[in-house]
Amino acid sequence: MNELFEFLQKEGIDPGLLDGVKAFREKYPTEAENAARVPDPEYYYYGKKTWELALASILAGKNLLLAGPKATGKNVLSENLGALFGRPVWNVSFHINTDASYLVGTDTYDGSRVSFRPGPIWLCAEKGGFGILDEINMAKNEALAVLHAALDFRRSLDVPGYEKIDLRPETRFIATMNYGYAGTRDLNEALTSRFAVLDMPVISEENLQKLISRRYPGIRPKIRDQLVKLYGELERKAESAEISDSALDLRGLLDAIALMEQGLVSGDALGMCIVNKSFDTYERGLIRDVIAARIPADMQRRDVFDV
Ligand SMILES: Nc1ncnc2c1ncn2[C@@H]1O[C@H](COP(=O)(O)OP(=O)(O)OP(=O)(O)O)[C@@H](O)[C@H]1O
Ligand SMILES: [Mg+2]
């Protein structure tokens, strides 16, 4: 956590907000029984403005909805927030069959008696957790209705047949929702209204440079810079609808670097991780051309890495 704190200071995050985080942590220290659920992030989220918006919302007691295209760091930021605030995290992946009893809890019979098995939302409420509601827009509205009272000023869970509990004051919910240039499945208004909505930007060139250098310290700076520019170019082409956003995938770019580090030649690595994500032959050709202008297809590991 100290390392993350130092990272944020170095990134120039408003010191007033960081003081707010410190005060929060002093007021709500991590309990030993929950410590194992506090994330220990492998990656840090880059983006000063986004950090500041997120910190201010959480300090103000709000729940956050992170909305944006794929691979813009929505989950990385959510986990980083759990780590920074020292809260245990419950991750819930929403899908079409997610139902209220899965979220809140359900009665189970162990052969001799019936007992209540709490679900992740219940545990967040009870233990002061951060609940990450991943891809929240994928669930059906009926399942989400159970969250309304938890997410607004009532801050409580009241499920017929069970006791009613109030959320601990430090409990927060961070939802994510993916939408691309081609739109997505919407989230209903009643739910959206209960979140502060943070539009997740595509990472800036400067931050992408920092991210790559941190994750792959051995990469040659010249290659790194070409990859950063390549990504920017794919982004511009997707934005202007020259290509779809199937190939605009930061995960893919980072995976391609990992494969080159394993010894694949650049053409194969970028092919598998970027080009082949489009299933349109014409588009694949366009993407291949954009790549070829910056990274020759026959680069070996020693051309890409210093060591
Ligand atoms: N601003 C950023 N700072 C740090 N890492 C980032 C950033 N943007 C993207 N990434 C990287 O992109 C990859 C995907 O991140 P993550 O899984 O958080 O994305 P996501 O927005 O949840 O994507 P999806 O919508 O596809 O689930 C990770 O390797 C992450 O480190
Ligand atoms: Mg995600």
Image (cartoon, grey):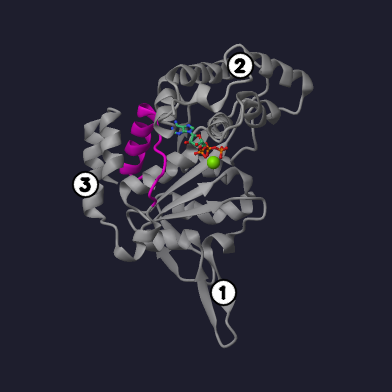
**Kind of residue indicated by mark 3:** Ala
Q: Name the residue under label 1.
A: 107
**Quadrant assignment, res 5:** top left
Is the distance from the Cβ of mark 1 to the nearest ligand 2 atom less than 8 Å?
Answer: no
Relative horizontal placement of residue 89, taking residue 287 as reference (left or right): left
**Residue 231, above or below 198:** above
Most foreground residue, 231 or 175: 231
**Mark 3: secondary structure:** helix
Is residue 60 inside the magenta stretch?
A: yes
- Residue at the (22%, 33%) spot, across then down: 15
Judged from the image, the secondary structure of the residue bearing numbered disc 2 is loop
Q: Report x, y in % for residue 190.
A: 54, 43
**Mark 3 or 2, nearer chain start:** 3
Let me know if residue 23 is in the magenta part: no
The dot on residue 213 is: none
**Mark 2 to mark 1: distance in Å?**
60 Å
The crowd level at tag 1 (other Cα within 10 Å; few <14, some 14-19, many 20+) is few
Residue kind at label 1, given as amino acid type: Asp
Picture quadrant where residue 143 is located: bottom right
Name which residue lies at 31% across and 48% down: 85
Crowd band around label 3 with a 10 angstrom C-alpha radius: few (<14), some (14–19), many (20+): some
Look at discs 3 and 1 and give the one toward the viewer: 3
Residue highlighted by disc 3? 23
Please report the bounds of the magenta region as a residue range: 39-62
